[in-house]
Image (cartoon, grey):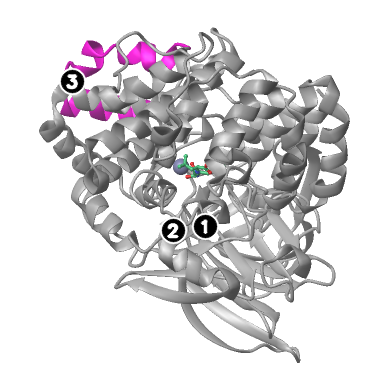
Amino acid sequence: MSCRDPHSYTDLDQGRVTHVDLDVNVDFATRRLVGSACLKLAAPASGPLDLDTRTLTITGAATPDGAPVPFELADVDAVLGARLRLMLPAGTTAVIVTYATSPEASALQWLEPAQTDGGKHPYLFSQCQAIHARSVLPCQDSPLARFTFKATMTVPEALTVVMAAAPGSQGPGKAAGTRAFTFEMPQSIPPYLFAFAVGNITSRDLGPRSRVYTEPETLDRSAWEFAEVDSMLLAAEEVFGPYLWDRFDFLVMPSSFPYGGMENPRLTFLTPTLLAGDRSLVNVLAHELAHSWTGNLVTNATIDDFWLNEGFTVWAERRIHEKLYGKEAQALGAAIGRNGLDEALASFGPDSPFTCLKTDGRGKDPDDFYSLVPYEKGFLFVALLEETVGREKFDVFIKKYIKHFSFTSITTEQFEAFLDAELPGVAAQVKAQDWIRKPGVPANAPTFTSAHLAMLKGLAAGWAGGQRPDVAVAKKWTPEDWQIFLQALPRQLSEADCQWLDDNFQLTQHGNCEILCNWLAIAANSGYAPTRDRTARFLGEVGRMKYLKPLYTALHKNAATTALAKATFAKSGGGYHPIARGGIERILSS
Ligand code: BES
Ligand code: ZN
């Protein structure tokens, strides 16, 4: 029996969908995609073929020569959605499913013109990771089931479609006032990397292989912020080997995009909160780029192996960062990551199984246990392997690992077997079992220090005893310095301390969202009233969960601002992505 994914109804022994031809109309009036998906199988099959769906309406199923295919939609499971069982006639090689999505599709956000930069046109985008592709098309929604695809998307003629795929042609659609765009993805992808956006979207070339797409109003700022993309691509190829996805384009999203970035192949999606105006947050672009190898070429088999995607990618992101900006910058990045990890560990508790690298997510919604653990504990484990065998040997190992598992989806156990074969004895030497299958961070975790880092942490540690940074010096700190310092400060400060920080450094007006969010969270935890307006406004400006969650949590748990948290959500929650809205509802009802 093939390996089964606990988050999908996929049974690869029934048949394997290896190509999809999608043809959909995007109807902004009813907030639905309506059309068909032709699913092609690797080999002729017969009998049941189980697919994943979520809030889809299935209107028909037939073979390409018109023979009807009986189908049955099972009862809805709260986590998995509804299983669609097709009964394939003997020798079936393809089946065409006609369907419509729901306005509540969990992967899709439909934006009113007022929620876009330009304010004139509506916008639609998808976010399929982890298990939301099934709300866009019926599919074997497991990373184990990779497929290639072709797509035709028909939209109102004023709008442009971009897709994580190679663009083909565009021309008038069948209905008056519409335009049809075609795409092709010749490299196989796991379903969670299926992605597209529709809106008033324009673009600019940044290098021979890279182009930025965004609304016209955001183009100049985006092109400047991410101008270094080509040097990142070259740095990444040195670490991992050749880039196999032809182009590395990216799309700067409307502000409601719920993540920092999403590594959709050929078209990474990025939050506009990265547009700090000083290139201080470009590590997110490096991160999504690094996924082109760790994640998109070598993919986690299931969510329980998610650390293989994210841990290796954070490690790679920091290698790219080190190449471009030096060791000191790399150490600061790692230290910021370690602070985030310690916070996540504290909130899960010392024995939580969610602090193991290999998790058991059976019966649980992946959006509910998403955390920094696979990222930062994963990073520390990979960095420990590198430290143990030495960079030169480890670089050879990484290149071989990527090449060996390219275009496949692997389990943690497959990684361990490869490690044992290639670097015998190393797993035991680093106590890999403790890292992978035990909670918390083992004592042999690498540490990242520098004199500068120690100075910043020392200043924050001395805060309670009355120590303060020299104002003139701190004004010259880099954004990373400020992040370290704010993360290391006590979570609650006196009113006078809050005022001292804000008067001297104008943190409430800061343009770097990492610094702003860190500061507003400290202020909210401290019950500091003068930042409340800015906090409420910020929660209306951004949809990135990394910022929404800590700020709503801080406002909610302080009795003086519980009502403000609720009122802010009532006002702004309608503009959040469905995934973000669900997350905040859980915080406010706790
Ligand atoms: N693939 C993730 C985003 C993701 C993970 C979406 C799980 C849905 C489910 C992406 O590569 C990511 O990790 N983004 C980070 C940025 C990064 C620098 C840590 C983010 O969104 O903050
Ligand atoms: Zn990632």
**Quick one: 589 or 101, which is closer to the camera?**
589
**Quick one: 367 or 101, which is closer to the camera?**
367
Counting other residues with Cα less than 10 Å from the Cα at mark 2, is it few (<14), some (14-19), or many (20 or more)? many
Locate residue 256, reporting x and y percent. Answer: 67, 53
In the rendered image, which residue does mark 3 sit on?
388
Element at label 1: strand
Q: Quarter-wise, where is residue 23 in the image?
A: bottom right
Is 86 contained in the magenta span? Answer: no
Camera-side mark, 2 or 1: 1
Instruction: Give the side of residue 537 with respect to residue 292, left or right.
Output: right
Locate residue 187, reporting x and y percent. Answer: 39, 62
Locate residue 503, reporting x and y percent. Answer: 60, 35
Q: Quarter-wise, where is residue 22 in the image?
A: bottom right
Q: Which mark is first along the chain, 3 or 1?
A: 1
In the rendered image, which residue does mark 1 sit on?
269
Locate residue 277, reporting x and y percent. Answer: 47, 57
> Over which residues does the magenta segment extend?
413-439
Is 325 placed above or below 460 here?
A: below
Residue at 45%, 55% (x, y): give it: 189
